[in-house]
Image (cartoon, helix red, strand yellow):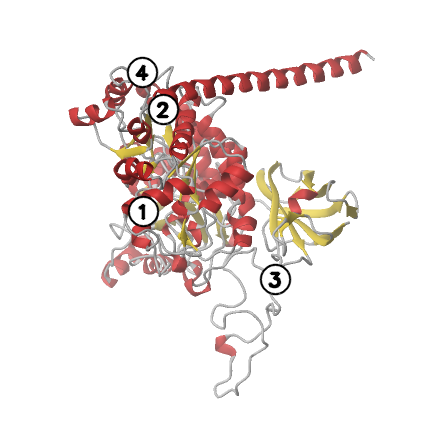
Amino acid sequence: MIARILILLSGVLILASCQSDSNRRNTADAQIEKRIDELISRMTVEEKIGQTNQLTVYGTTEELCEKIRNGEIGSLLNVVDPADINTLQRAAVEQSRLGIPLLIARDVIHGFRTVFPIPLGQAATFDPALVEQGARIAAIEASAAGIRWTFSPMLDISRDPRWGRIAESAGEDPCLTSAMGAAMVRGYQGEGADDPTSIAACAKHFVGYGASESGRDYNSTNLTERQLRNVYLPPFEQAVRNGAMTLMTSFNDNDGIPSTGNRFLLEEVLRNEWGFDGMVVTDWNSAGEMVSHGFAADTKDAAMKAINAGVDMDMMSHVFSLHLKDLIDEGTVDERRLDEAVRNILRVKFRLGLFENPYIDTARIARVTYAPEHLEAARRTAEESAVLLRNEGNILPLDASALRSVLVAGPMADAPAEQLGTWTFDGEPDHTVTPLAAIRAAYGDRLHIGYNPVAAYSREKVTAAKLAAFTAQAASYDAILLFVGEEAILSGEAHCLADLNLQGSQSELIAAARRSGKPVVTVVMAGRPLTIARDLANTDALLYSFHPGTMGGPALIDLIFGNAVPSGKLPVTFPVATGQIPIYYARNMTGRPAAGNELLLDEIPVGAGQTSLGCTSYHLDAGFGPLFPFGFGLSYSTFEYADLQLDKEAYLPTETIRASCRLTNTGKRTATEVVQLYVRDRVGSTVRPVKELKAFDRITLEPGQSRTVEFELPAEDLAFWGLDMQKRVEPGTFDLWIAGDSQSGNSVTFTIN
């Protein structure tokens, strides 16, 4: 009885605490709105327009300070010196008429000084808690430099690895991208946005940018509203639900309408449906580029269309500062719309506590940069992000005690800047620990470690003679560690590729290592999936490491020598050949799926009569599927899935599906498995995907240990936008899998009534 009373009392206290927190937030919000009202009532039209104007600068000038004093600038990006920021803030807070602080922004994409794996690599961890920790560390370091706004997370669903910006994404899946994006938002913004170590998150790019034609950056997309709502919008909605303070429009036009001028997306969906009360900023000059699109006649027309569509702040187009006053005077833009934009901007500044704490402690950055706990988190993230794709004969992990010598080779073995990956303006190569440095530090006193990059950089073409000499050198070592991939500049914005093979002579380098007759372990460091089918045959083991950041070297060496066990899983499908792209697991069910026994190109008889060879959906020259499926990743152990069960056979749309299986570590090492739950809706009012990821969990087991893994899946998570463009759970039959990747496992069936 006493225990029951204590439990009830605890529940009451928790409820009271939650209500108290909610009341405090409501009171704080009401106070902020009152302060905004008062401030706007005192502003001239010119000062309001100034708040919508974001410029990029590097350092301080008297001319810049004068513009700030005059209220002509609301936000600056790319100022990273705390002393400079204090000078600029002083001009805004102490020397301008209204004292409105500046919002200082920067692309802090996967770390500030301590660089974490690229976002695609972070997604490979399937570990939202670790990703949230990385974003928190990035915020702590960036805020110490005076940065209070980052243009991250990028939530574009990315199903075309030719697109360079796939590196900044969480891959191809809405469920995984939603989880990773929400984790980053929470990490950046922390417990309270007004904490001086918090920075405002910016969910980008709204929306569909990752589906650009041919994988070419800035290109058009042609996604239907149903595709947008079912696939591309959910990660943004989750970011909003998790409190993202800002959102960025995308460069692309979709169905002929540039995002920056798309009122349906910015007002009807974002504001009215989702209740977003944050700030919308353009991407760099995306308002001005509506003229290039042919959507706006000139920059004045672009300014009118952007502000009326729901844009609040203009990044580097200058169209608001040049034209809004005239547009308001002419009546084509209502001043109340400008007031709304300014309100959204000021709300972010108030919520960040900038009015109370506009200045930076210039000594703090030295205290927090490269803190030991930051480096350890970066190392662990790099470790969890690496995906083991091949391990013939269980060659990995290497036993250092059984080796006398190791040859480290390849252009990525000691390339500190390339290891950091794309979009790392503030990463410092001098602080990067490469694989070569890491193996020397860990095993230099026990092993003879040779080093030969062979190619100075990933694109270098080397001579046959140089490759032959490398083969001869490799034959004198006990094992060869090859580090290949792509330079950081080959992925990211505006770095798209039509050919995804390893660049330069790297495939020939792997083949040359194979000819030595010694064990070959290959590590690929890249910003995207590459077409490595031809390279797999020439290596005993292959670890794929999406550019792993500052501590990538120690993480990879720990994995290779067994001090850590690979647990990463692919966040994106790997194609056999570029011609298969786009290739992704959650494709729609087709009327003629491949059976897997159709004739391939080399099997077609010469002179064969004209037939359709089975009338199914596949490529004659690439086969029936990917090289590696979404969710795939090997371990140094093995896992067995058994006893897949549901708590019931039928559910109402308001109920929760409870699914479980028994997972057993059948290997000899303690290891972590990413357990994935997939669902198929057999029949819908529109064609449904063959599978959809709905949940996942990381489970660590000792050798021989079993655990019942349980998932609770609300039936409402099966809802989709159907034929009538309403989102609902449709009754019918569903299949459910719990497995180690998107192509494995047996299923059970249930119904929704």
Is residue 103 at all visible to an observer of this figure?
A: yes
Which amino acid type is shown beneath numbered disc 4? Asp
Going from N to C along the chain, the mark reached first, 3 or 2, is: 2
Of all residues shown, which one is farthest toward the front?
Answer: 330
Is residue 488 at all visible to an observer of this figure?
A: no
Secondary structure of the residue carrying tag 4 is: loop
Tell me how far mark 1 sits from mark 2, CA to CA. Answer: 37 Å
Going from N to C along the chain, the mark reached first, 3 or 1, is: 1
Nearer to us: label 1 or label 4: 1
Residue 710: quarter of image: top right
Mark 4, residue position: 361
Within-10-Å neighbours for mark 2: few <14, some 14–19, many 20+? many
Tell me how far mark 4 sits from mark 2, CA to CA. Answer: 10 Å
Tell me how far mark 1 sits from mark 4, CA to CA. Answer: 43 Å
Question: Residue 301, labelled with which disc?
Answer: 1
Which amino acid type is shown beneath numbered disc 3? Met
Closer to the camera in the image, 682 or 660? 682
Going from N to C along the chain, the mark reached first, 1 or 4, is: 1
Secondary structure of the residue carrying tag 2 is: helix
Secondary structure of the residue carrying tag 1 is: helix
Question: Residue 143, labelled with which disc?
Answer: 2
Of all residues shown, which one is farthest toward the right?
Answer: 1
Give the x, y percent position of residue 523.
40, 48
Question: Residue 369, labelled with which disc?
Answer: none
Tell me how far mark 3 sits from mark 2, CA to CA. Answer: 47 Å
Mark 3, residue position: 589
Q: Are marks 3 and 1 in contact (CB under 8 Å)?
A: no
Quarter of the image with the N terminus is top right
Going from N to C along the chain, the mark reached first, 4 or 3, is: 4
Give the x, y percent position of residue 129.
53, 32
Give the x, y percent position of residue 652.
76, 44
Query: Image height check: is 571 above or below 361?
Result: below
